[in-house]
Image (spheres, rainbow, N blue to C red):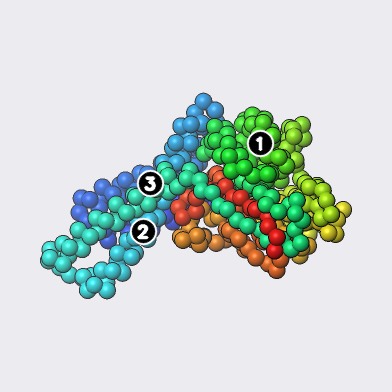
Amino acid sequence: MFLIILLALLLLVTIVTLLALPHVFNGQGYRVMRGVVIAFDVVTALGLVLGPLVFSSTLVDSIAAFLLRVASVGLVMQVFFALLTGLFFVWQWFSGLRGNVPFDHGRRRVLRHAAAVPALAALGGLYGGLYEKDATVVRELFVPVKDLPDELRGLRIAQLSDVHLGWFFSLDDLRALLERTAQGAPDVLVITGDLFDDEAMNPEAIALVDSYVDRFPFGIWFIYGNHEHRRNFEALDAALGATRIHKLVNASAVVQDGARPLVFVGVDYPRVHGDEAFTAARKEFTDAAWNGVPQNAITILLAHHPEFIDDGAARGAALVLTGHTHGCQFGCFGVPLLPVFKYNRGLVHIKNTLGYVHSGNGSWFPYRIGCPPEIAYFTLRRK
């Protein structure tokens, strides 16, 4: 089904691009660009269908990753080209230059301006695919908590999410990310799912994360995302259980004891379909995780899916940390351009609960624009 959706989107991009080409190119230039677009998209489609068979060996994984990045940049270039052509068409219309004879001075000026369209499309495609995808930013946020005990004031939590180890995020990348996160001097690190996403890399990745536990005074805490459940989950779960990484699966644990203890509550990813079943599973997981949590505890809910923010708010959590959406990967001035979730990116305020949807550190589609990967730090302070 996922492959069918990708092929349908590719077909749509191809059609729209071919319709846009004659508004920018003419004559031989149009014929050349039409041939390039058709050839590129046909090869991309064949790669999507045959790629899993051709690139099944780890010896050529790097080649596959490179080709997929090229394909993603090319496809985004086409999308930008179509959008910019539409804007250019509107500008022509309102400028009164549509319909002029082919060789008048106004028409020639229009064609000179049209050269900017493919240039801007190429720039946008290359920027998001070669730079912003890996341009991790640091976000500093404060969490106001009523009656916060003195011993918890200034406690600093780091969050990573959606690393998606594999073709587009290597073990060296993970090591660099963990090192940079630790250099921010947080007291604790939480990872909200979709980290271990490659069966071949998972054992070494687990050992790598475990080696960083001592860099965080309150340890490393982890909850599962949907992708971990697709990667030999039983073996992964057993391997994590043999480390010092704190794994929370519909459970809670005291991080700091005291008159008002700090408690982390972690939920699994509901692997069900349908809104009603998903809502019921969320409630079941949250109820199980909250069982035994002291009434006066300061609770922080760790969840992969952002709709758990509602469940955490209903139970008075001070903070809910989630991921899953990748911030939608396409944004403009911090606003997601493809908002397909209830909560897509950034802060969510519900009564006394602060929710956060992490933009992710990796991706399955190797492209970001207006939505860079991030390291998020949360500092507790008295309200």
Q: In this view, which residue lies farthest toward the top? A: 59
Q: Toward which corner of the image does residue 66 lie, by quadrant?
A: top left
Where does residue 174 sit, x and y in percent of width and height? 57, 36
* Of the image marks 1 and 2, the number of the one nearer the N terminus: 2
- Tag 1: Cα neighbours inside 10 Å, few (<14), some, or many (≥20)? some
1 or 2: mark nearer the eye = 1
Give the residue displayed 73% in from the left and 42% down from the top.
218
Instruction: Compute the Cα span from label 3 to label 2.
Output: 16 Å
Instruction: Compute the Cα span from label 3 to label 1.
Output: 36 Å
Rendered image: mark on residue 82: 2
Q: Measured along the vertical axis of the image, is residue 296 above or below residue 185?
A: below
Res. 164 in view = no
Where does label 1 land, which residue? 215
In this rendering, position of residue 75 left or right of residue 343 = left
Q: Toward which corner of the image does residue 220 lie, by quadrant?
A: top right
Label 3 residue SS? helix
Looking at the image, which is closer to me, 331 or 50? 331
Where does label 3 land, which residue? 126
Q: In this view, which residue lies farthest toward the left? A: 104
Q: Measured along the vertical axis of the image, is residue 310 above or below residue 35?
A: below
Image quarter in which the C terminus is found? bottom right
Instruction: Compute the Cα span from label 1 to label 2.
Output: 48 Å
Q: Amino acid at mark 3?
A: Leu
Q: Measured along the vertical axis of the image, is residue 277 above or below residue 181?
A: below
Res. 138 in view = yes
Where does residue 342 sit, x and y in percent of width and height? 62, 63
Give the residue displayed 41% in from the left and 51% down from the top.
76
